Image (tube, rainbow, N blue to C red):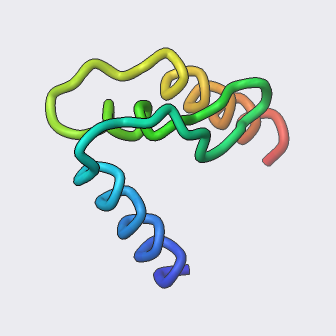
Amino acid sequence: MIKFFNSVEKEVNKIWNQASSTGYILARCGDVNLTDEDIVSLKGNNWLTDQVVNIYMYIYIYIHNYI
């Protein structure tokens, strides 16, 4: 599991260090697409995008209902 999180951290850092965002879709959760622009919003004191909030809520509801 630690190996998985290390690889995710590596990819996130790569996105944070990009010169500019491309809008490339990295993941889909329910009907919400998560792009590199959304990942950039997680760095520093930026506003979160609606997609980040929506995916968080989708996962929260899924865990609450199914686990």
Closest to the observer, 45 or 36: 36
Q: Position of residue 47 (x, y in %)?
A: 27, 18
In the rendered structure, the answer to whether residue 21 lies left or right of residue 32 reads left
Closest to the observer, 1 or 40: 40
Q: Position of residue 10 (x, y in %)?
A: 36, 69
Closest to the observer, 28 or 54: 28
Residue appearing at x 59%, y 46% in the figure? 26
Residue appearing at x 50%, y 32% in the figure? 23
Q: Position of residue 58 (x, y in %)?
A: 68, 28
Residue appearing at x 71%, y 29% in the figure? 61
Residue appearing at x 49%, y 84% in the figure? 3
Image height of 18 relative to 21, above or below? below
Closest to the observer, 65 or 47: 47
Image height of 44 relative to 1, above or below? above
In the rendered structure, the answer to whether residue 41 lies left or right of residue 25 reads left
In the rendered structure, the answer to whether residue 64 lies left or right of residue 40 reads right
